[in-house]
Image (cartoon, rainbow, N blue to C red):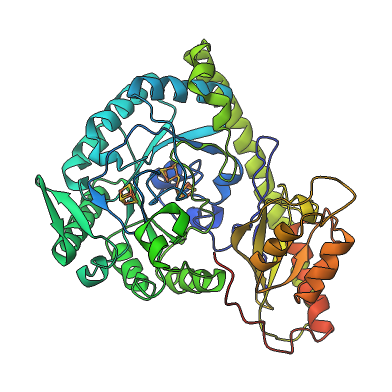
Amino acid sequence: MELKVPGQTTQASSGGGCSSGGCGSNGDQLAHLPEAIRDKVKNHPCYSEEAHHYYARMHVAVAPACNIQCHYCNRKYDCANESRPGVVSELLTPDQAVKKVMAVAATIPQMTVLGIAGPGDPLANPERTMETFRQLSEKAPDIKLCVSTNGLALPEQVEELSRHNIDHVTITINCVDPDVGAKIYPWIFWNNRRIKGRKAAKILIEQQQKGLEMLVAKGILVKVNSVMIPGVNDEHLKEVSRVVKAKGAFLHNVMPLIAEAGHGTFFGVMGQRGPTHGELQALQDACAGDMNMMRHCRQCRADAVGLLGEDRGAEFTLDKIEGMEIDYAAAMQMRADVHAAIEVDREAQRRQAAEIQVPLAMLQGVRETRPVLMAVATSGGGVVNQHFGHAREFLIYEASRQDVRFIGHRKVDVYCSGNDTCGAAETALQKTIRTLEGCEAVLCSRIGYEPWGLLEEAGIQPNGEHALEPIEQAVTAVYREMVEAGRLDSPAPRVSRARA
Ligand code: CLF
Ligand code: SF4
């Protein structure tokens, strides 16, 4: 068995303890990259899985308009290409956005990246987007600038983006075949005309591919987001992955379609389903043969603030920022000191992780079996340390005789707020159990009597015996117990209904 580095957090981080195995670009994957690229990626929480335990990002919602229509989008809400559908952000002017960014940077020194991701398409609002970037590259040069676009207006903006020192661009590419595209995009707005159907999809695809090539030629790192739409582009995304990798994209982020009738989107109203967890994982694994896959995306809001998975936006509303005096020179010094301390801590964590070879020994003599999925409740630090009923998300690991690998996270609603009882709200608990479908064990620090019974009934073995152990070590120990008990001799449960 190969030991993957446990995700570790510092005091500065409260992110989950997801392992670096197979998720985005981790420390090991970065090792072979040229120095200049490592420098760009090492403190970007989306481009480096390891970095997301330590560093935060923020978005400013300065871009209201969009130049295309996606069938998974309702214009009342933020752009669903890099946001959770059904979320509305407060629109800011570039001046307000710049003030907000500087206020957040001075308060949350771990914030390293400012992204513009909506609420419409940033490059369909070039003046507002570029003015924000222009001011920030001047006033806050220690912040990385990042943008996410549908790609239609990208080629004409590449030069301007590189002038503002933007070295991370996300393009949402859902297809490279216009026939597939026609099922996703009903129209685009192009050269002052609305163009529909296959012709529209063809133009969009050409612009996306041209933009990708131009960015790569300039040395700008490109992440490709793809929305997985079962029956529409799921099989086709393997081809997308192959094509964008061949053109030099750095990272591929396959996100699940979230379509609900209540969001008023075409797909939602038509009853188009999103992928199950199993389908999403299978596609990510299939694409991973071709390129680095991002598996820690949290589908943020267009005004998100904080570590991935947390949102501190409410601390930085316009009225609160108004009253803040910011000495950015002093803030920059403080930020540099905090980043230096984080890097020292990160290096120590890496060394410590490299020394933990326990699972190798723990699996001696264990026979070969099918792999098994386990859910882990953690509030950070790379250890099993959270009460089952307090978890807002579970990290999902796959254990086999070959390795223990992080494969994603699943969000749940908290149903228990007290320390001693669990399971008062039956519906939320049932929903959590459904969300964990496909997992055969759940590791947590504590768990109440009622959820224990319901989990067992659902075929998921609760386990509170590995509290405060490093996650990989705990998962390995439980795997060994399951093998020895013969639990993996029968086929894995069918994963069918739980949506990613
Ligand atoms: Fe924002 Fe996107 Fe830049 Fe990150 S988010 S513009 S690359 S700074 Fe990150 Fe959020 Fe996923 Fe986006 S977790 S939705 S991938
Ligand atoms: Fe909506 Fe974004 Fe698509 Fe525009 S690009 S239609 S804002 S999801």
Q: Nearer the viewer, residue 476 or 418?
A: 418
476 to the left or right of 103: right
In the depicted structure, whether residue 387 falls above or below residue 320:
below
In the depicted structure, whether residue 500 falls above or below residue 382:
below
Residue 357 visible in this rendered orientation of the protein: no
List x then y, in percent, for residue 417. Answer: 79, 45
List x then y, in percent, for residue 135. Answer: 33, 22
Residue in the image at 16% along x and 49% along y: 189
**How many numbered marks appear?**
0
Residue 182 visible in this rendered orientation of the protein: yes
Image quadrant in which you'd find residue 192 = top left
114 to the left or right of 334: left
Question: Which quadrant does the C terminus fall into?
Answer: bottom right
Q: Nearer the viewer, residue 128 or 197?
A: 197
Residue in the image at 40% along x and 43% along y: 78
185 to the left or right of 21: left
Image quadrant in which you'd find residue 277 = bottom right
Question: Which quadrant does the N terminus fall into?
Answer: bottom right
Q: Nearer the viewer, residue 268 or 183?
A: 268
In the depicted structure, whether residue 143 falls above or below residue 231:
above
Q: Nearer the viewer, residue 292 or 199?
A: 199
List x then y, in percent, for residue 319. Answer: 51, 17
List x then y, in percent, for residue 235. Answer: 37, 76
